[in-house]
Image: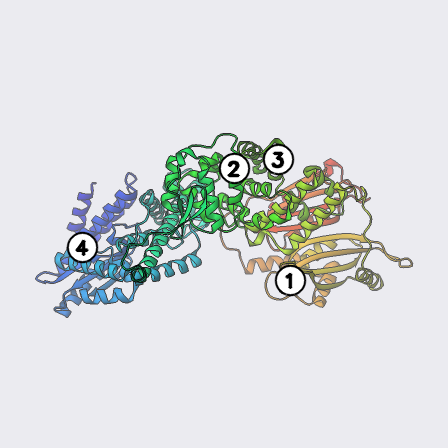
Amino acid sequence: MTSTDMRKEADDSGPSGYAAARLRLLTEGARSGPPRRTALAELTDEWLTGLFAAGAEGMRGVSLVAVGGYGRGELSPRSDLDLLLLHDGGDADAVAALADRIWYPVWDLGLALDHSVRTPAEARKTAGEDLKVQLGLLDARHIAGDLGLTASLRTAVLADWRNQAPKRLPELLELSTERAERQGELQYLLEPDLKEARGGLRDATILRAVAASWLADAPREGLDDARRRLLDVRDALHLATGRATDRLALQEQDQVAAEMGLLDADTLLRQVYEAARVISYASDVTWREVQRVLRSRAMRPRLRAMLGGGKQTAERSPLAEGVVEQDGEVVLARAARPERDPVLPLRAAAAAAQAGLPLSLHAVRRLASTTRPLPTPWPAEAREQLVTLLGSGRPTVEVWEALEAEGLITRLLPDWERVRCRPQRNAVHIWTVDRHLIETAVRASEFTRRVHRPDLLLVAALLHDIGKGWPGDHSVAGEIIARDVAARIGFDREDAAVLATLVRHHLLLVDTATRRDLEDPATVRSVADAVRTQGTLELLHALTEADALATGPAAWSTWRGSLVADLVKRVSALLAGDIPEEPEAAAPTAEQERLAIESVATGSPVLALRAQTEPPADDQPSGDPEPLGVELLIAVPDQPGVLPAVAGVLAMHRLTVRTAELRAMDLPDGVEGSVLLLNWRVAAEYGSLPQAARLRADLVRALEGTLDIAGRLAERDAAYPRRRGVVAPPARVTVHPAASRLATVIEVRAQDAPGLLFRIGRALEDARVQVRSAHVSTLGANAVDAFYVTGAKGDPLPREEAAAVARKLEETLRG
């Protein structure tokens, strides 16, 4: 059925006919995107025109006007109808009756309606008081009735907007900034709001309003396509969910992707991010131009008086060869010849970032259209300018985005295309892959005084996740890419090897420090073998911290930093030949010894809770120590079931385990018995820590077998069921036979959940293995725990037995 047939059906059959025609239009497989939105608007216009005509017979000076999204003809399947009944102030009762004749049929069909009844004067007055109303009226479109009344309102509203623009645009910018802070940036969010997030449909509409003010206009290239893409996604989201929603939730992304004929949810998100990036960049450029124009207008009367009416000439300050500052932006000098100077894009970008200024749109586009490619390998100046750009701190982000918007980054670094706008489906990461790489460089710029080769640190920061655009282990793929890029941009073979090592092992320090026993010489030796030199270790330490800080708040803490620093100290000593190959037993502290003696004397567990701190950093002005967490020390007579008992009691009290160590303790001469010492670092999930006496009482009951931990945890889970969300991948258990000569290392990767460590500990007890130590790490929703286990005689497990234990653990966690 054609659109004409649908409109005829709606006109002939009234509301039920409109509903049937609307449903048929929305379920047509052959039509989507702009044609469907246009057809839906036309169909709705025809129906409302019929309602208006039936109720307005004999009336004059009244019209029905579509505003907002409906005024623009952008009706998604579940969009509101934004309508204004405009009248000249005549018969109020007749106007009210007409409004009822239109509004009630709309409500009867279950359509959302945003409506108002006003005279032109009332509409203008309301617009002057409410910026949202004014923006909606800028898109006013006549549907039915007195065309002259609608036209005069449109003319007056546009004139008001242009006259009031110097006052209203700053107000609009402030509202947009506040909204972006609340909603976040569309181009990075895993569950974005397509309308309200920065770079979304709301910002695209605002750009139209700015253009209507005649003060500034947005860069048009790609903007219409970006807006269309977001509207298409919203249409598919409405059809997939059957709801009027703008939030692209995780559980609905596969269905929306299928509705749009896309490969998968990642492809969908990448298209959303690309569209948002276009709109965000256009917004940045447009608002800079608005502010420039408003500054210029404010300055003009004073300058004219000072210059006696002469014409002002914009001041140009040199920044670098071929690059100048003008009017708060970085532009090309008049003598610049980009077609003869292939280093100019990097030189201009570095100069802009160093000065903390934006690159002008005209300059970037001229560079993109005329600059010749750099030779391979790059000249030294090009490499130095790239390092300068990366080392400029926070201003690097805006300059890099300007280069990327015009395709200059992928021209300089072709491998960038695979990570551009690539989503990261990990709750720990708050950025896309490409933005994370730039954020890491920004963080690394703070550490350039800590390393002997800041250039290698900054380039490694830029490249460390470059392998995420390829299948397989991104560190392995990234090592190959980094070596190739290093050679292309002009590093010698030795430096390229260091960069490749840094990329290959950028996760080594944090993974080892949080998941391996640092007292085991095999742990320290494995890291030393990977880095080989003190210089590479120094660089890797700085890169590790920069990477974690750029990932998100859950990826780094003072506690993690202290573990990594301890590992680096041990590896550095080994590389310098200052530590023995075999470990020395650590002497117990006075408190540990006191607890152990008390445990032997009482035949029961004793424990102590205390806050752990470290001295303040040099750049911490307060001088207060930084918290590392809460240390839980437990001494308990050696017996089976200690690990699951302690882990279960902590889970019952909602304590998160950050790290855990369990070992047998040598008692002082004259004291008989065998004591296990547990040194754990814990934190409360919420609220305050429980009292030590309560923990001890529950631990005594757990060890006696009178406390049903499994039952208590099950009751709590049943009382507070988890929300439905993305199905987590199954747990994975791996044996690392070469990780230690003293024990077998079993690593568990699973979805974090209350009681997880209890279940693991109970499974290991059932397997009749002894846990020498445990190293627990939680990253977002993922737990990565490593257990050093031995047989009954204290030796590493035979290969087959270790594999059997791993299989049993996997079965337990999947059950």
The residue where tag 1 is placed is 653
Marks 3 and 4, the one that precedes in the sequence: 4
Marks 1 and 3, the one that precedes in the sequence: 3
Q: Residue 358: image x %, image y %?
A: 42, 49
Secondary structure at numbered mark 1: loop
From the viewer's side, name the closer residue of 109 and 656: 656
Observer-side mark, 1 or 2, equals 2
Task: Give how far apart the Cα atoms at labels 4 and 1 are.
Answer: 64 Å
The residue where tag 4 is placed is 142
Q: Categorize mark 3 by other alpha carbons within 10 Å: few (<14), some (14-19), many (20+).
A: some
Going by the image, does 800 lie left or right of 94?
A: right
Going by the image, does 408 lie left or right of 137?
A: right
Q: Is residue 89 above or below residue 799?
A: below
Marks 4 and 2, the one that precedes in the sequence: 4
Secondary structure at numbered mark 4: strand
Q: Mark 1 is on which residue type?
A: His
Visible residue check, residue 78: no
Q: Residue at x 40, y 39 (%)?
A: 336
Task: Give how far apart the Cα atoms at labels 1 and 2 are.
Answer: 60 Å
Task: Give how far apart the Cα atoms at labels 3 and 4 are.
Answer: 67 Å
The residue where tag 2 is placed is 381
Quarter of the picture holding the N terminus:
top left
The residue where tag 3 is placed is 495
Q: Categorize mark 4 by other alpha carbons within 10 Å: few (<14), some (14-19), many (20+).
A: many
Marks 3 and 2, the one that precedes in the sequence: 2
Q: Residue 52: image x %, image y %?
A: 15, 58
Secondary structure at numbered mark 3: helix
Q: Mark 4 is on which residue type?
A: His
From the viewer's side, name the closer residue of 343 and 769: 343
Q: Is disc 4 in contact with disc 2, using a CB cutoff of under 8 Å?
A: no
Q: Residue 780: image x %, image y %?
A: 57, 51
